[in-house]
Image: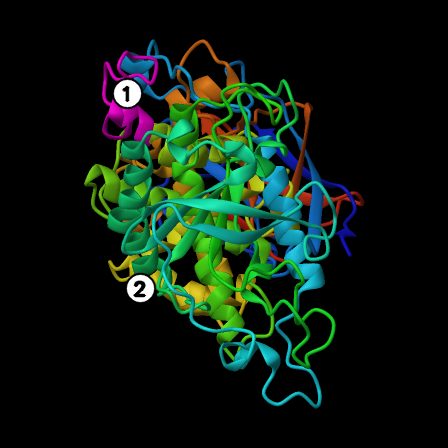
């Protein structure tokens, strides 16, 4: 249930004169920010500012970022609504802060980038929601051990031999157009087209209509898909999330390219498409082994399998799909869905686990997998600080003929995360990383990826792979799991993340290194992506920062658990004493659950 608090007003008052000392004297109270040095951060609670934040008259220009943060540990439990009672300064805008170092990149175009990203999200939403509502990891009374721990000993499950190229295998494809993925499925057969050390690539016979797989894929393309999985995706995801399960005992993951996935993208959809998915029902028994409802899934192929978009040169399944677009468009999908496979499989077999990972963290880790595989593919280090020129070198474009390989990697592994983060940055007051809306909101997913990326950079002791393995292993879920892996409080994590989202690579003198990303230079990578996503004419850092003045404009804001709202407080030399108050509708000092005020002196 969402608890909505009464309106809160942030009052900015000015008075002539003032008794400040220019910030050179000792700070007597936490609320007096005049003595803060450049780069210093002050964390305030409501009890620290009963009379507001005070800034006595100063002898020089000063610039502060004030973040009203909400660190409640209960996702969606507290939504604090408030109003900033102040004029915006003449140059104050919503969400436009031009990065000076981006001038040379402002004319660069991101061409042929898939900006419509909702089709894949919708498919993921349905699959993840069904898993959590219809499949259970809870041991049932009277069933010892629970059926999920004895599946490998079931008489119906035996080690499967590795098929040869040309063999025909029986598979069941969950019908993603329905609401029950276990009961509604399409039985079909598939021709094995490529077999490697870790992968079995098969193509649905319904797609082939009697032709061999090479009618849709050149053999070199088929083998390149399994080779990339063997050499990059499998070892990378395994090192970040743990060894995947092997329910059917053949040591391989099946990649099924099927037109049933193509049908999930409505005809005529521009840009976005469903690339494929993993369904946890495939690791459950197909029949009841004594665990009752939720412990089995009739659709189950009882093995590790992906369902992927298939080439469709004539548009028989709804939209024309070339072989090259399918090859390119499913690379990130495989990296993403493999994390879901590892996470769900290992939770399934862990007797200490009672539920799947919370959606926000499961998706954050899957998006993290895209980034991790992209880094390995490009030869970047786990914590190498990437600029935009790293992820997309100057002069490189996916519209080049032939396509620039770095652009293909950028589109497959990097762009989507940065685009989703843009969605959060323009509306940090509306979305937060821990929200249950991770199953429906790109902005929430962008924020979730960003805070996990920040934690891996700053709370992993330099080993992000060990950190994400802890998250994937559980046994806890969600915020509790996140706190356990970082060994930090949510207060500290949210503080560091929110400040870093503004301060990253601004080179603010004296700033603690914990307020920086190690893996990205956000001030470099975000402006060009934001320009493409928001259709801007110039490359600007997209974080919404509202400038407050000294009048009576009303700037409304909302704080969700795990997020915050950004305000800029600029003070000229000789200005009078200024006070910022956070009050409720009755004019009293506000005190909502999780309330923290972060003040960063920028100049």
Reading the image, the residue beneath label 1 is 101
Q: CA distance from mark 2 to mark 1?
A: 34 Å
* Left/right of residue 416 with respect to residue 459 in the rendered view: right
Image quadrant holding the C terminus, namely: top left
Residue 407, given in percent of the width and then of the height, sits at 30, 24
Residue 217 found in image quarter: top left
Q: Tell whether 229 sits left or right of 152.
A: left
Specify few, some or many for label 2: CA neighbours under 10 Å numbering under 14, 14-19, or 20 or more. Answer: some
Decide which of tag 2 and tag 1 comes sooner along the chain.
Answer: 1
Q: Position of residue 328 (x, y in %)?
A: 38, 30
Q: Residue at x 30, y 34 (%)?
A: 219
Which dot marks residue 501? Answer: none
Q: Looking at the image, is mark 2 or mark 1 nearer the viewer?
A: 2
Left or right of 228, for residue 3: right
Residue wearing tag 2: 466
Q: Which residues are magenta?
A: 388-409
Could you tell me residue 202's position as x and y percent?
43, 45
The secondary structure type at the circle numbered 1 is helix
Say few, some or many: other residues with alpha carbon within 10 Å of mark 1 (under 14 / 14 to 19 / 20 or more): few
């Amino acid at each position: 249930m969402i608890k909505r608090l009464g309106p809160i007003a942030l009052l900015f008052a000015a008075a002539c004169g003032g008794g400040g000392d220019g910030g050179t004297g000792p700070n007597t109270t936490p609320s007096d920010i005049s003595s803060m040095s450049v780069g210093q951060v002050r964390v305030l609670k409501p009890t620290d500012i009963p009379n507001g934040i005070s800034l006595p008259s100063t002898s020089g220009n000063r610039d502060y970022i004030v973040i009203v943060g909400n660190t409640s540990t209960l996702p969606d439990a507290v939504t604090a609504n408030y109003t900033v009672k102040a004029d915006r300064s003449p140059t104050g805008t919503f969400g436009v802060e031009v990065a000076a170092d981006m001038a040379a990149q402002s004319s660069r175009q991101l061409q042929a980038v898939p900006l419509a990203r909702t089709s894949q999200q919708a498919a993921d939403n349905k699959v993840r929601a069904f898993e959590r509502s219809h499949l259970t990891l809870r041991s049932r009374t009277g069933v010892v051990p629970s059926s999920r721990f004895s599946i490998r000993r079931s008489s119906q499950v035996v080690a499967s031999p590795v098929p040869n190229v040309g063999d025909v295998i029986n598979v069941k494809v969950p019908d993603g157009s329905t609401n029950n993925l276990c009961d509604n499925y399409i039985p079909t057969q598939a021709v094995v087209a490529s077999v490697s050390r870790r992968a079995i690539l098969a193509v649905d016979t319904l797609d082939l209509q009697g032709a061999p797989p090479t009618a849709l894929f050149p053999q070199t393309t088929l083998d390149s898909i399994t080779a990339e999985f063997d050499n990059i995706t499998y070892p990378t995801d395994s090192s970040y999330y743990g060894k995947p399960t092997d329910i059917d005992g053949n040591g391989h993951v099946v990649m099924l390219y099927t037109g049933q996935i193509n049908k999930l993208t409505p005809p005529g959809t521009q840009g976005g498409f469903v690339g494929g998915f993993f369904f946890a029902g495939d690791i459950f028994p197909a029949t009841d082994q004594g665990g009752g409802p939720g412990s089995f899934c009739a659709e189950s192929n009882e093995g590790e399998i992906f369902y992927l978009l298939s080439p469709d040169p004539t548009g028989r399944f709804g939209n024309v799909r070339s072989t090259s677009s399918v090859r390119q468009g499913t690379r990130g999908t495989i990296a993403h869905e493999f994390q879901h496979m590892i996470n769900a499989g290992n939770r399934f077999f862990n007797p200490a686990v009672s539920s799947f990972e919370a959606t926000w963290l499961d998706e954050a880790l899957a998006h993290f997998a895209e980034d991790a595989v992209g880094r390995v593919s490009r030869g970047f280090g786990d914590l190498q600080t990437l600029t935009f020129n790293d992820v997309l070198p100057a002069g490189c474009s996916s519209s080049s003929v032939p396509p620039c390989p770095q652009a293909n990697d950028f589109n497959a592994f990097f762009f989507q995360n940065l685009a989703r983060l843009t969605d959060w940055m323009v509306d940090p007051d509306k979305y937060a990383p821990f929200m249950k809306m991770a199953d429906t909101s790109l902005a929430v997913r962008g924020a979730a990826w960003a805070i996990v990326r920040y934690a891996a950079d700053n709370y992993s002791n330099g080993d992000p792979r060990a950190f994400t393995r802890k998250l994937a292993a559980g046994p806890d879920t969600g915020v509790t799991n996140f706190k356990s892996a970082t060994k930090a409080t949510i207060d500290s994590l949210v503080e560091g993340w929110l400040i870093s989202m503004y301060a990253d690579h601004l080179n603010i003198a004296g700033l603690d290194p914990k307020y920086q990303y190690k893996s990205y230079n956000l001030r470099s990578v975000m402006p060009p992506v934001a320009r493409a996503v928001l259709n801007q004419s110039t490359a600007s850092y997209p974080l919404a920062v509202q400038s407050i003045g000294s009048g009576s404009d009303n700037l409304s804001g909302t704080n969700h658990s795990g997020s915050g709202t950004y305000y800029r407080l600029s003070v000229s030399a000789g200005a009078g004493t200024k006070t910022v108050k956070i009050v409720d509708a009755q004019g009293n000092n506000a005190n909502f659950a999780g309330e923290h005020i972060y003040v960063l002196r920028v100049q």
